[in-house]
Image (cartoon, rainbow, N blue to C red):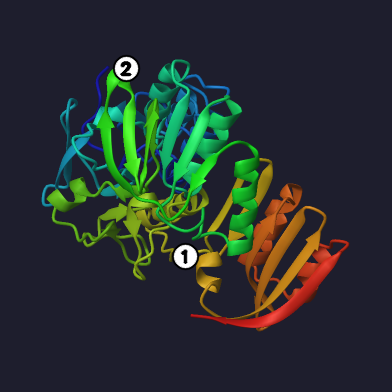
């Protein structure tokens, strides 16, 4: 196949950011020539579905964001390759195997990768990650021969992975250097509900615990020392967080910090190069790291690359997850966890919710076990519903309800 070398727009990274950027571009001018460079061995897919499907497994084309026909219809050339160098002066991009391409505008949606575990001489292939499809495929290949797993980290990724492994009948231990799981997303009472649910399902949860050493022993097992304890596991899964893939930007001398620095229009320090999704670091230092935020940034970047000026506005952080028999929803907790708010706590049976009001506006919500109305809860925060509208639109027959003013520091 002969591939053109000149494109109106080049996008690096097969993600929802890329897909939404293409949608925006195509709506403005369907004849725009786009090159999409993806570093994975499959069509771009919904990454958030990967570690949620350890129980059933998945095929290579599962969770794909678009078909081959869709790319053709949108005038997109999709290649599986790795971008290696940007020449800003020549406005060109070099790849590992397919050569050099030129662009008018460039979008970097290079995402993040799992942080590296650093214990003794633990090699990269001595532990599992669940960040992308190939990571989880490796785990799925080995899982039938292994029974006991240690998960390091208690963020969403670690908790969802533990839920899947327990459902597969595995023995799971979670080591958490913090005092409770998902603490950046949940108040203490909700974290405690999660801890109880995990323990009821058989998870051995160890808060305020750090690993002293990890040693590979017989039969590809691992001896882990923590505190005064020593335990042997068949597999170790790292869920300690991610770091942005900024090396391509750094080599091109674009301004970076933890991510690629962008302005309110998602432009980098080079006005013809944009960045969006998990890799973008915004003017207030925020890196959004969520699916819906990455999709929104793709839409905005696409418009701006087509000279339709559209300012990016950081939306409230929202996450939902379905684990250990609980449905948990958290919206804007990181922001409402500081400042002064009126807090309304409501409960009906196993449905529990906490609403944070300021100036009669809904600023944040924590909710448990009201899954069917999750979209309305999200809308309430995004649109800052009044207290009256919230209670009228999302009523419950409250068995417990109380409100109080609180100031967080």
Q: Give the class, few, some or many, for how many residues have Cα within 10 Å of label 1's Cα (few <14, many ≥20).
A: some
Give the residue drawn at x 17%, y 47%: 91
**Label pair 1/2, CB-CB below 8 angstroms:** no
Vertical side of 124 occupied by 176: above or below: below
Q: CA distance from mark 1 to mark 2?
A: 49 Å
Q: In front of the other: label 1 or label 2?
A: 2
Numbered label tally: 2
Q: Position of residue 183 (x, y in %)?
A: 51, 59
Give the residue drawn at x 59%, y 56%: 191
Residue 256 falls in image quadrant: bottom left
Instruction: Depth check: give the residue in front, 19 or 354.
Output: 354
Which mark sits nearer the N-terminus, 1 or 2?
2
Say which element carries label 2: helix
Query: Which image quarter is the N terminus in?
Result: top left
Q: Position of residue 284 (x, y in %)?
A: 36, 71
Instruction: Depth check: give the residue in front, 359 or 251.
Output: 359
In the drawing, what numbered circle is on residue 259?
A: none
Residue for badge 1? 314
Residue 103 falls in image quadrant: top left
Residue 244 appears in the rendering: yes
Residue for badge 2? 219
Vertical side of 247 occupied by 330: above or below: below
Residue 81 appears in the rendering: no
Q: Give the class, few, some or many, for how many residues have Cα within 10 Å of label 2's Cα (few <14, many ≥20).
A: few
Q: Position of residue 391 (x, y in %)?
A: 80, 69
Instruction: Depth check: give the residue in front, 252 or 406.
Output: 406
Q: Position of residue 373 (x, y in %)?
A: 74, 52
């Amino acid at each position: 196949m002969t591939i053109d070398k000149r494109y109106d727009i080049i996008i690096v990274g097969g993600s929802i950011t890329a897909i939404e950027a293409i949608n925006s571009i195509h709506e403005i001018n369907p004849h725009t020539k786009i090159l999409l460079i993806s570093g994975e061995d499959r069509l771009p897919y919904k990454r958030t579905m990967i570690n949620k499907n350890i129980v059933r497994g998945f095929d290579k084309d599962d969770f794909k964001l678009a078909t081959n026909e869709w790319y053709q219809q949108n005038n997109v050339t999709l290649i599986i390759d790795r971008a290696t160098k940007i020449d800003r002066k020549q406005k060109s991009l070099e790849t590992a195997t397919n050569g050099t391409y030129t662009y008018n505008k460039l979008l970097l949606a290079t995402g993040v990768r799992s942080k590296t575990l650093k214990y003794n001489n633990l090699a990269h292939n001595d532990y599992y990650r669940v960040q992308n499809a190939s990571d989880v495929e490796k785990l799925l290949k080995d899982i039938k021969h292994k029974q006991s797993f240690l998960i390091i980290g208690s963020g969403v990724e670690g908790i969802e992975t533990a839920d899947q492994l327990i459902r597969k009948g595995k023995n799971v231990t979670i080591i958490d250097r913090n005092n409770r799981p998902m603490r950046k997303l949940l108040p203490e009472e909700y974290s405690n509900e999660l801890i109880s649910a995990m323990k009821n399902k058989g998870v051995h949860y160890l808060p305020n615990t750090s690993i002293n050493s990890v040693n590979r022993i017989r039969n590809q097992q691992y001896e882990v020392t923590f505190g005064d304890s020593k335990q042997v596991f068949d597999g170790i899964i790292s869920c300690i967080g991610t770091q942005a893939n900024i090396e391509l930007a750094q080599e091109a001398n674009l301004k970076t910090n933890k991510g690629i620095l962008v302005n309110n229009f998602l432009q980098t320090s080079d006005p013809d190069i944009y960045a969006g999704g998990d890799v973008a670091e915004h003017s207030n230092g925020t890196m959004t790291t969520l699916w819906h935020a990455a999709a929104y940034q793709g839409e905005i970047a696409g418009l701006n690359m087509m000279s339709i000026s559209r300012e990016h506005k950081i939306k409230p952080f929202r996450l939902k997850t379905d684990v250990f028999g609980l449905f948990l929803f958290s919206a804007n907790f990181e922001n409402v966890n500081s400042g002064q708010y009126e807090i309304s706590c409501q409960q009906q049976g196993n449905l529990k919710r906490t609403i944070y009001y300021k100036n009669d506006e809904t600023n944040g919500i924590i909710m448990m076990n009201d899954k069917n109305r999750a979209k309305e809860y999200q809308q309430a925060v995004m649109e800052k519903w009044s207290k009256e509208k919230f209670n009228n639109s999302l009523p419950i027959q409250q068995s417990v309800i109380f409100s109080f003013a609180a100031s967080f520091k």
